[in-house]
Image: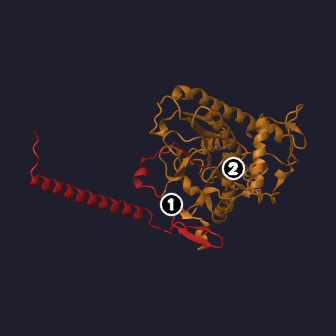
Amino acid sequence: MPAPTRNPSSCDPTAWPERRFYAMGCHMSARLAIGPARAAAPLAQVEALFADAEKRLSRFDPNSELSRLNACPGRWQPVSRLLWDVLASALLMAEETGGLFDPTLLPALEAAGYTRSFEQLRDQRMADEPAAAGPMGDGALPGLPADPSPPLAPWPGGQYRLIRRRPMTHKSPPQVRLPAGVKLDFGGIAKGYVAQQAVMLLRRFGPALVDAGGDLAAGDAPPGFPGWPVAVAAPDSADEGEGRDLALVWLANAALATSGTDYRRWQWNGRAVHHILDPRSGQPAATDLVAVTVLAPTAVQAEAWAKAALILGQQTGAGALAARRLAGLLAGRDGRVTITPALRPWLAWPALHDLNSTDETDEER
Amino acid sequence: MTRRPAPHSYRRLKLTLLMASLAASLAGAHLLAWQESLLADASAPGSPPPATRLTIPAGGAGAGEIVLDLAPVPTVVAPAHQAAIRPVARTRSSR
């Protein structure tokens, strides 16, 4: 991995030192607006932070702390501070979103075919079908039984409320007990939580920005700028380089997260599915949105509400965000882009009149 | 010994100053008009942003209230500025 070598420039935030790495199934980076020599060590610490989190929280690793917890329902299990805090954040978001964000959907995800990391699913598919399209391609995944059985029975939502927790005491670590049939998957919440921790670590050294696979957490703005200039990529746009962007945001002391169905999708039992499940049904969300981006004080909150709004759909989702004064951008399947009023002050572009708005005053008129 | 300038030199100087002042005023007026036209183009709606209504006491017991309707301050981004900003990161669904 490249060490930061570029000299900082107050005129170009892309010149600030950056460290890129791969963790938790995603391409990540961390950037510090200080000199390269001073930035090297703290940026390396960020990579180590994510590596440690992945070892503890990956559901694809049978030896991870999360996997061991999921394997022992009905029993009190000691957990690390990290898992405890991530679980606490997830449960808080579940309550805040009325259960639309639900960390107990793992059985439904596995029943929909998401039993391995998406990279493993994609790599196996490409090895077996070299002429097939990329991760968004069509066609059944090889090696899976063509089971014509009907979809899952109705999903018992709200099971996250059955999880029991014992906080740490001077004699014992924190403990968690999962009820039978309940398994945890933190999804983007874990990435967002660790990204936030990374920003807190880097903040002591200078203005920082962490990109955890598209979930962005920012500290102070870099010198000479109102924030870190970050773009909201258009769904299905290219991964690298100057892809199509829907907006540019000045991000400082806040987080930006996107939930979408444009990438992690596949064929299962003859139908197209994606990884955003509706907790009310346990099925892939039937939504008229392809992606939702939310800007919030923390990455955890941004991630949870992006997912919730995506599930709700363009009109209801935009209304839910606007009602809570949350900043959001919703990209519909019909190509329409909607923003909530709270996002406006953060926008570098587009100009305000270019966008549809869910401004309450406009609706009243 | 310093010679006083001739009267016609004063007149010429005054005329020059007057013409320069007129030219500067005209140029300034044109510049303001051009800026306003840019502003008008950039903020051509759609629907205009909502006004802000303030209700404040008029002062004195029983003096009633004053209602002010404040027009919003337009916020626009000049197209040239947009092209100069390069993002350092992009948010997108996880990959």
Left-right relation of B35 to B14: right
Of residues A106 and B11, the one nearer the viewer is B11
Q: Which residue is mark 1?
A: A352
Tell me if residue B56 comes above or below residue A104 in the rendering.
below
Q: Quadrant of the C terminus of chain A?
A: bottom right
Name the colour assigned to chain B in the rendering: red
Residue A166 visible in the shown view? yes
At which x and y percent is residue A202? 62, 34
Q: Picture quarter containing residue A23? A: top right
At which x and y percent is residue A105? 77, 51
Q: What letter labels the chain drawn in orange?
A: A
At which x and y percent is residue A99? 77, 56
At which x and y percent is residue A10? 46, 37
Residue A286 visible in the shown view? no
At 80% from the left and 58% from the top, the residue drawn is: A155
At 55% from the left and 57% from the top, the residue drawn is: A344
At 38% from the left and 62% from the top, the residue drawn is: B36
Q: Residues within 10 Å of mark 1 (few under 14, many from 20)?
A: many
Spatial CA distance of label 1 from label 2 is: 25 Å
Q: Which residue is mark 2?
A: A301
At 52% from the left and 46% from the top, the residue drawn is: A226
Amino acid at circle 2 = Gln
